[in-house]
């Protein structure tokens, strides 16, 4: 049975990769902001459609739906692609640390995430 890596060796590698961890963390944070902005814009355009429907302005509702809603939905998809790419970058970073430490991904992930602001769960 393989010997479990010591936390000190994992921490040492994590410290050596702190610049990469910080860069990945900043990328995730920026991409999350983009998703939030896209969601807000999509909500606003959907609310406008609802307002027009409530006012029985069906042509205006349709126009907003085909223009603003469609545009904002595409914007949301693009921002989601960015955050997915950033999440894959994080997983790749954790995997490289795990490989270097000769450890399992699950053993390394908490040490990397401890260094990342984006990994901190916000209260709901």
Image (cartoon, grey):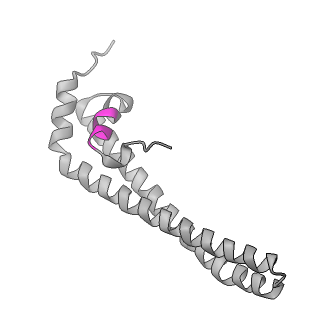
* Residue pictured at 19% horizontal, 32% vertical: 11
Q: Is residue 114 magenta?
A: yes
Image quadrant of residue 65? bottom right
Residue 36 position, x and y percent, is 49, 63
Residue 44 position, x and y percent, is 61, 73
Question: Residue at the top extreme?
Answer: 1
Q: Does the magenta stretch include residue 44?
A: no
Residue 33 position, x and y percent, is 42, 63
* Residue pictured at 37% horizontal, 43% vertical: 120
* Left or right, residue 32 beside residue 107: right
Q: Give the range drawn in magenta.
A: 110-115
25 w.r.t. 55: above or below: above
Which one is in front, 28 or 107?
28
104 w.r.t. 53: above or below: above
* Left or right, residue 32 beside residue 77: left
Image quadrant of residue 91? top left
Which one is in front, 25 or 87?
25
Q: Is the magenta stretch mostly helix, strand or loop?
A: helix
* Left or right, residue 71 beside residue 121: right
User: Quarter holding the N terminus?
Assistant: top left
Residue 81 position, x and y percent, is 50, 62
Q: How many marks?
A: 0
1 w.r.t. 14: above or below: above
* Left or right, residue 49 beside residue 17: right
* Residue pictured at 18% horizontal, 37% vertical: 13
* Residue pictured at 22% horizontal, 24% vertical: 7
């Amino acid at each position: 049975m393989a010997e479990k890596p010591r936390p000190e060796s994992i921490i040492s590698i994590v410290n050596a990769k702190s610049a990469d961890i910080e860069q990945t963390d900043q990328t995730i944070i920026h991409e999350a902001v983009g998703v939030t902005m896209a969601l807000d814009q999509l909500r606003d355009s959907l609310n406008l459609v609802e307002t027009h429907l409530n006012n029985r302005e069906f042509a205006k509702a349709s126009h907003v739906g085909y223009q603003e809603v469609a545009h904002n939905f595409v914007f949301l998809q693009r921002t989601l692609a960015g955050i997915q790419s950033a999440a894959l970058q994080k997983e790749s970073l954790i995997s490289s640390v795990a490989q270097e430490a000769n450890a399992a991904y699950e053993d390394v992930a908490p040490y990397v995430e401890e260094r990342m602001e984006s990994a901190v769960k916000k209260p709901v």
